[in-house]
Amino acid sequence: MSSFVVEGGHKLSGTIRPQGAKNEALQVISAVLMTSEEVTISNIPEILDVRNLILLLEGMGVKVTRHEKGVYTFKADEIDRGYIMSADFVAKCAKLRGSVMVVGPLLARFGQAYFPKPGGDQIGRRRVDTHILGFMNLGAEQEYVHEKRAFYLHVPEGKCLEGRYMLLDEASVTGTANIVMAACLAKGVTTIYNAACEPYLQQLCKMLVRMGAKIEGIASNRLTITGVDSLGGTEHKILPDMIEIGSFIALAALNRSSITIKDVAYDELGIIPESFRRLGVNLERRGDDIFVPEQESYVIDSFLDGSIMTIADAPWPGLSPDLLSVMLVTATQCKGSVLIHQKMFESRLFFVDKLIDMGAQIILCDPHRAVVVGHDHTYRLRAGNMTSPDIRAGIALLIAAMSAKGTSVISNIDQIDRGYEDIDIRLNALGARITRQ
């Protein structure tokens, strides 16, 4: 198991550019299965989860050409239909969270697909009901195949997917994306209400439109898709990763350092900059860059009535749950108190015991809520040995270790590598001292 050895307490300075968005990449790369024509995608983050998804597509028969770093062309004109029904394929999908996104395209184009229980972060129960109920609304039938530990979805013989109105039980991002892709090749009109509308879902819809899909209501929570017979090729550029941008803001604040984050697609960041301002971080927008100045103290805001600030996740345009871990660790060195409320995943805050061992003042109220009392940099966190439980907790622990007194060891960093490309190399260029072992 690989690990990071982190020598804490070093000031950071310089410029860093975010990678392409992981969550968008998993969606748009899966969408190449919707057509037999070439699709070229740029700004792909070459991280573990994305590389594994590309390998999965290659195993299915997709022709993949890597032109340069982050730029790939895909051609899904000779899919091995026998393989996508095999136990080996289902087993590989079960190990990769992003594999859920291939189900909609396969069902739409070939009329059948397996949907195994997805892998990925161990952050609590992650339902797939929204996906499956959406496919069934379009006319697919499902049965659970025990020997493959997967749902088998198929369009009955002599029938096709047919559009209809549906109200989603939750604004699931991956669920919305999967249903949208399936609906693009369904007969008739599909209306999806309570749809997710985050920028990465908007990017997927815009890409599908360029491929020939008919989608109305993009950026809203009500999407109308008129099915077409087939889709064609296109070119697409992935947005910068907003979660990585938030992580860089956090590490600058926790280390009282000044850095510039380049080319952030600022207008797509929504509430993220304002959420960090609530923790006292003074951000400056400079064109499409963010400048984080060095500050001696970061004072947590209060609500207008004087009550304790609460930062909670919510569906877009609310705050992404992926950012709460790094905001929590930032608050440990701010001045004041804040309640972090993680609503979506019941196990995502359990990493705070590691921060408490480092000297952070955190009260874990229940699996969803934690109160952080900031040290205002009057007490530095202690170095320690810890294990990364998931991608976002892993980067939060790395940020904490960079500010701590002494040398920390973080093991199981494959979890961090799943979401952050060459993170040690890039942070060392800013002045960090991180050694990979």
Image (cartoon, helix red, strand yellow):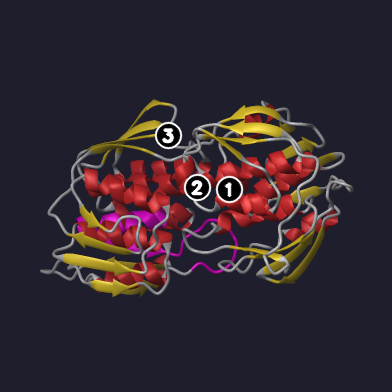
Quick check: 10 left or right of 250? right
Q: Are marks 1 and 3 in contact (CB under 8 Å)?
A: no
- Foreground of the two, 15 or 43: 15
Q: Amino acid at mark 3?
A: Asn
- N-terminal of the pair, mark 1 or mark 3, is 3
Can you identify the residue that label 1 sits on? 273
Q: Position of residue 230 (x, y in %)?
A: 15, 50
Judged from this view, the residue extending furthest toward the front is 304
Can you identify the residue that label 3 sits on? 43
Q: Are marks 2 and 1 in contact (CB under 8 Å)?
A: yes
Which corner quadrant holds the N terminus? Answer: top right
Asked if residue 91 is positioned above or below residue 68 in the image, the reply reads: below
Judged from this view, the residue extending furthest toward the left is 158
Between marks 3 and 2, how big is the CA–CA gap?
17 Å
Q: Which residues are magenta?
A: 99-126
Between marks 2 and 1, how big is the CA–CA gap?
7 Å
Q: Amino acid at mark 1?
A: Pro
Which mark is on residue 193? none
